[in-house]
Amino acid sequence: MVGVNRQPLIAGNWKMNLDHLQAVAFVQKLDWSLKDAKHDAGTVEVAVFPPFTDLRTVQILLDQDKIEFALGAQDLSTHDSGAYTGEISGAFLKKLNASYVIIGHSERRDYHAETDEVVAAKVQAALKHGLVPVICVGETLEQREQSGPTAVSVGQLEVALEGVAAGAEIVVAYEPVWAIGTGQVASPEQAQEVCAALRAVVADKLGQDAADRTRILYGGSVKSGNIASFMREPDVDGALVGGASLLVDEFAAIIRYQKHVGV
Ligand code: PEP
């Protein structure tokens, strides 16, 4: 069960999928599917994280059709503006009414050599521009075997929260690298263990109030068939969903997890 004051968050990370035309069709279908099922939008916050080139189109669609999904980006620059070819400023994302930005996804850490220090600088950039950072942490299988289930994620979050104010709004996503896109999902107990340790880091760095209100997500091969088991855990407040967020019916079923038996 999600903590009493924390609204569950189901976030769809599209990665490098769906161009801006496909994005329109997808968002409309998802909205229709949820409305057809009489989904109560107030029960769960839904956020979509399209590629940069889709953001303006999706922003206009959400606005015009009064669709209650939050908008997020998949990354941002550590800089505000200037000679940084290919980079995107948090200020630009804010102008597009983006609420969230994913920071430190394992694919950025792996393929773009993003260190914990870069992740921390991006967290600062997001907060400076009024964006809520979705801070991703997680261990590889090798790291889990070497240092246990929590050490890597705890260490990554400690660095990411350096200099963050106690009142800042952040979201944390525990994404074990071995579970991302592999179909090898963590057990609810494994997710709970790490999410609880991450909440303790938030308490230590930002105080108990922040720990009580901060949403901590699980990510890694989440599907409609397993979401409910994660959401039963006390420290799991939602999910960051990759592959399954690209399938309208599947993502709608994940969003509607409260309708699944036993939650
Ligand atoms: C992700 O990339 O954030 C993710 C969790 O992917 P998947 O759901 O496909 O494992």
Image (cartoon, rainbow, N blue to C red):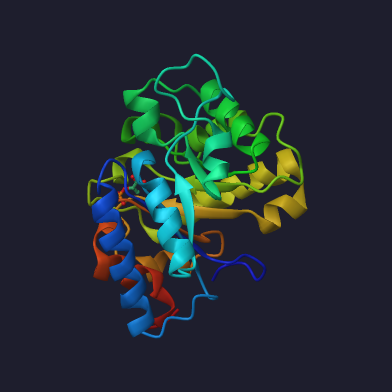
Left or right side of 198 for 70: left
Where residue 244 appears, x then y in whole percent? Answer: 27, 58
Left or right side of 91 for 183: left
Q: Is residue 189 visible?
A: no
| Residue visible at 25% across and 53% down in the picture | 21
Q: Is residue 7 above or below residue 38?
A: above
Image quadrant where one finds the C terminus:
bottom left
86 vs 215, nearest the viewer: 86
| Residue visible at 47% across and 17% down in the picture | 84
Q: Is residue 37 above or below residue 92?
A: below
103 vs 263, nearest the viewer: 103
Where residue 248 appears, x then y in whole percent? Answer: 26, 66
| Residue visible at 53% across and 51% down in the picture | 195
- Name the image quarter holding residue 112: top left
Image quadrant where one finds the N terminus:
bottom right
Disc tally is 0
Left or right side of 39 for 29: left
Residue positioned most to the top: 83
| Residue visible at 30% across and 53% down in the picture | 185
Where residue 36 appears, x then y in whole percent? Answer: 33, 84
Q: Is residue 187 visible?
A: yes
Where residue 11 appears, x then y in whole percent? Answer: 43, 56
13 vs 254, nearest the viewer: 13
